[in-house]
Amino acid sequence: MNASELAGHLRFSTWASHRTLDSVKPLTADEYARDLRTSFGSVRGTSLHTFGADRIWFARLVGESPGTFPTDATHPTFDAIDRDWRDLLARFEAWGAALHDADVARVIAYRNTEGKPFETPLWQIVLHVVNHASYHRGQIATLLRQLGRTPTNTDLITYYRSLAK
């Protein structure tokens, strides 16, 4: 694994998250917040969780205090999540573009949300972030279908094909 490959994974995750946000944007406020009895209840809850995890991991990677997960109070509307998540994704992508091969194996020391200490190589964190977001984007796609909507394709092969155009 090298820095260019990690940056490529982050570009994919940004692309896919943007497409997911674009799929969510047309929902009514009721649809967005409707409890569909999933892990995080609704499209809103799943979006808050995924954005929050991205934000916490980014803070750890850049040596900042990760803070807490966003809530309905801190992000009361889709527009608030959309704005802040897109901003974070841009920062994540720029951070990835500035990585050097020597950074890839660097060990990041941090505490999880329960205060337990961990040390993890940077490359493993980045791949976790991408995988975690993919998992929850898939959940959002399912929730959109349950609401009678059509999610946008976020498959990795679709991303690669978009690069070839």
Image (tube, grey):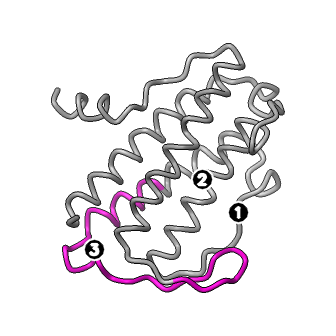
Nearest to N terminus: mark 3 or mark 2: 2
- Quadrant of residue 68 within the rendered picture: bottom right
Distance from disc 3 to disc 1, alpha carbons, whole Å, reads 26 Å
Viewer-nearest residue: 115 or 84: 115
Magenta region: 89-118
What residue do we see at 22% from left, 64% from top?
1
What residue do we see at 49% from left, 54% from top?
87
Q: Nearer the viewer, mark 3 or mark 2?
A: 3
Distance from disc 1 to disc 2, alpha carbons, whole Å, reads 8 Å
Distance from disc 3 to disc 2, alpha carbons, whole Å, reads 23 Å
Residue highlighted by disc 1: 69
Q: Nearer the viewer, mark 3 or mark 1?
A: 3
Q: Are marks 1 and 2 in contact (CB under 8 Å)?
A: no
What residue do we see at 82% from left, 55% from top?
73
**Residue 74 vertical placement versus 59 (above, below):** above
Q: Position of residue 41 (x, y in %)?
A: 79, 39
Residue highlighted by disc 3: 104
Q: Give the label on residue 41, or none.
A: none
Q: Residues within 10 Å of mark 1 (few under 14, many from 20)?
A: some
Q: Give the label on residue 51, or none.
A: 2
Secondary structure beneath label 3: loop
Q: Residues within 10 Å of mark 3 (few under 14, many from 20)?
A: many
Q: Amino acid at mark 1?
A: Phe
**Residue 160 vertical placement versus 121 (above, below):** above
Let me know if residue 125 is in the magenta part: no
Q: Name the quadrant of the C terminus.
A: top left
Furthest toward the left, the residue is: 164
